[in-house]
Amino acid sequence: MLLLPAIIILLAVVLIPLLLSFYSSFTPYKLTRPESLYKWIGEYNYVKLAGDVNFWLAFGRTVLLLTIALNLEMLLGLGIALLVNRVTWGQRGLRTIMMFPMMFSPILVGFQFKFIFNDNVGLVNNALQSLGISDQAIPWLVDGKLAMFSIIFAEVWMSTSIFAILILAGLFAIPKDPLEAAKVDGCTPWQSFRHITLPFLMPFIYIALAIRSLDVARAYDIVKIMTNGGPARRTELLWTLIGRTGYVDAKMGLANAMGYASIILAVFFTVYFFRKLSSARATLGFDT
């Protein structure tokens, strides 16, 4: 009986909306036509997605963003963690500073970088022109390729600290005996890192990759603020397309179908990284 209030809240807040949205994905439900919620059309929305070029382009861009951002964040986070771990004075202050970017909301980060990459008054263009590197404003948020680069830059700036903090925690957890034994045996710093430090860090890296893959697969706020999917939908990602379909075009049934189809992407990367995590733990002898 003590769990009854929690169960009721979970049903009201999570399960019922989830079931309702799943049901509506099999209907032609439009916000402007509430009665369409009761018309069953089966898997029509999902069949339509299979041939929707805009959906697959958005899917591909999301995978591209996820791949590039995760790899850059992992490499930069690893480098920062290794540098901070070598600091003997002021390390606590550096760890606090490392956490600052992840304290900002994605909406605030979006506005921040929208100003930084602005064509006319942006800090980047002003700096490039002042240094004589460029004699004209670069259309960071207007050119399709540059706009995607700007979004990736903002994502990496905001979330690299997640990798750095988790990897730094892994560095603190590494036992000293294997490193000292390797040093006595004449191993170079690279050999010690490659064969001792890195294998111990891999479980922490895979945890960070699993967490961030879920975030990037659902990327919306930064893209919405910085480019709104433009120019000409060249930065349209899955969740900006879903938002546009559901609230601008009012096709909520189709938008929900897109949402459930996109869950496949998040589930795939999560399962993949957790399998890699289990493999890394087994290599270290943590799993029997």
Image (cartoon, rainbow, N blue to C red):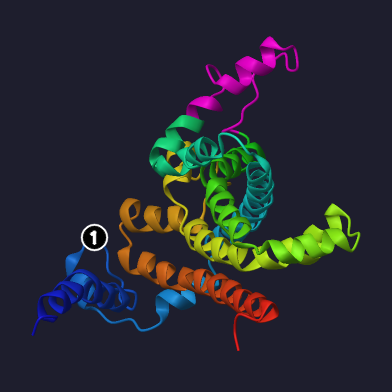
Q: Nearer the viewer, residue 52 or 81?
A: 81
Q: Nearer the viewer, residue 73 or 235?
A: 73
Question: Which residue lies under the disc numbered 1?
Answer: 31
Q: Residue furthest left?
A: 1
Q: Residue 146 lies in what quarter of the image?
A: top right
Query: What x and y, as percent, mark residue 259?
Result: 41, 67
Query: What x and y, as percent, mark residue 52?
Result: 53, 66
First to last magenta residue range: 114-142
Q: Is there any visible trace of residue 198 in the rendered image? A: no
What residue is at 52 percent from the left and 17 percent from the top?
121
**Left or right, residue 36 beside residue 220:** left
What residue is at 59 percent from the left and 84 percent from the top?
287
Q: Magenta includes 229?
A: no
Q: Residue furthest bottom?
A: 288
Q: What is the quadrant of the C terminus in the image? A: bottom right
Query: What x and y, as percent, mark residue 211?
Result: 50, 62
**Left or right, residue 10 beside residue 145:** left
Q: Amino acid at mark 1?
A: Leu
Prevailing secondary structure class for the magenta stretch in the rendered image: loop
Query: What x and y, as percent, mark residue 264?
Result: 50, 74
What residue is at 16 percent from the left and 79 percent from the top?
7
**Residue 265 vertical position relative to residue 152 in the rendered view, above or below:** below
Q: Magenta includes 141?
A: yes
**Left or right, residue 176 beside residue 153:** right
Q: What is the quadrant of the N terminus in the image? A: bottom left
Q: Is there any visible trace of residue 5 in the rendered image? A: yes
Label 1 CA crowd tier, 10 Å (few <14, some 14–19, many 20+): some
Q: Secondary structure at mark 1?
A: loop
What residue is at 33 percent from the left and 62 percent from the top?
251
